Amino acid sequence: MVVLRSRVNPDDAESVKNHVLNEVIAAFHHGETEYCLEYQNIEVQTADAIFDVIDKRFEGHTTRACYDSLEKTLSFIIMPSFLHDSHQAWVNRSIYKAISQQVLTLEEYTTMKVSSGTRFSGFLPPYQKSKKEPDLSITLTGMMFPTVVFETGYSQSRASLTKVRDLWLRGARGSVQVAIIMKWIKSRSGVVKGDLEVFGLNAQGSIESLQKEIIFPAPPNAATQKILLTKAQLFGPMLTANQSATDTMVLALDDLRTIAIEDMTKQGLRPA
């Protein structure tokens, strides 16, 4: 895991573009190492030009990109690691259980698109020029934005994750019901701590924390820790009169731990 926060002159668009390209090329050459590249004070025209070049030069390579037009911050996650993406198997396993337990019907599932790295744009002001590729999103048929997003910080800082959370909850046209923010912290000796926090909007439209859980070290209540997503949250404005808003899909944190430990092992890491 490598974090690079560039001091390149943001007013020189060509220099910024060349610097990004060189860093992305270098990151891919390092194979399994996850890189986080962050650039401050980037104007939208420069960001758009960089997105165009990245799309053309590195199609098929694994990156997660974000441009926050409010903060004027451009960031890339290069080669997301096994641990970084461990939530993907967790969510898919949870959906499978919800279907097998008849909490979700197959018909409901066919309206849900679960994806990673899909680029979203068209955010509301002051984020109107932003672009974001979430670590995971659940988007309903006919909707422009997801109802649920997961963002993971392995090489990203908590401050960066907070800004991403704000982008989704304030800029996604009221579609995003829940933003789940996960943070992994690796010590120099390869020991990993982790936590997650669930955020939503209250009746006044302000962001509020709905739940916070420790992943590693596993707490005394580990066996009963769970995130509950209601159908009202999963389906948002697409919820129909035939659906029960309070029916709940369970994401058991012990399932996440099992997956995360397996992924850590592949990277030579171990849980706290």
Image: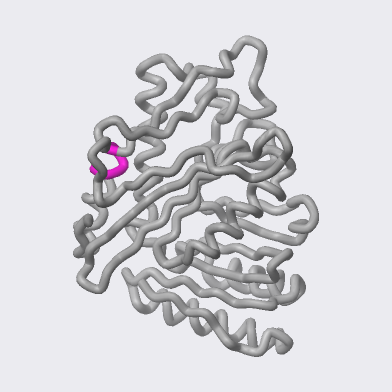
Most frequent secondary structure within the magenta stretch: helix
Question: Residue at (70%, 46%) from the top-left corner?
Answer: 172
Residue 256 is one of the magenta-drawn residues: yes
Is 90 positioned to the left or the right of 11 in the image? left
Is 232 positioned to the left or the right of 93 in the image? right
**Is 157 or 268 nearer to us in this picture?**
157
**Is 189 or 19 nearer to us in this picture?**
189
Q: Position of residue 222 (x, y in %)?
A: 26, 37
Question: Residue at (73%, 37%) from the top-left corner?
Answer: 204
Is the residue 152 above or below the residue 41 in the image?
Answer: above
**Is 58 or 65 nearer to us in this picture?**
65
Is 108 positioned to the left or the right of 214 in the image? right
**Is 140 or 227 nearer to us in this picture?**
227
Quarter location, residue 32 = bottom left
Quarter location, residue 153 = bottom left
The residue at the far top in this view is 242
Question: Residue at (57%, 55%) from the top-left corner?
Answer: 133
Is the residue 137 above or below the residue 231 in the image?
Answer: below
Question: Residue at (64%, 45%) from the top-left corner?
Answer: 207
- Evaluate whether residue 115 shows in this view: no
Q: Quadrant of the C terminus?
A: bottom left
Q: Position of residue 164 (x, y in %)?
A: 59, 57
Q: Residues in magenta?
A: 254-258
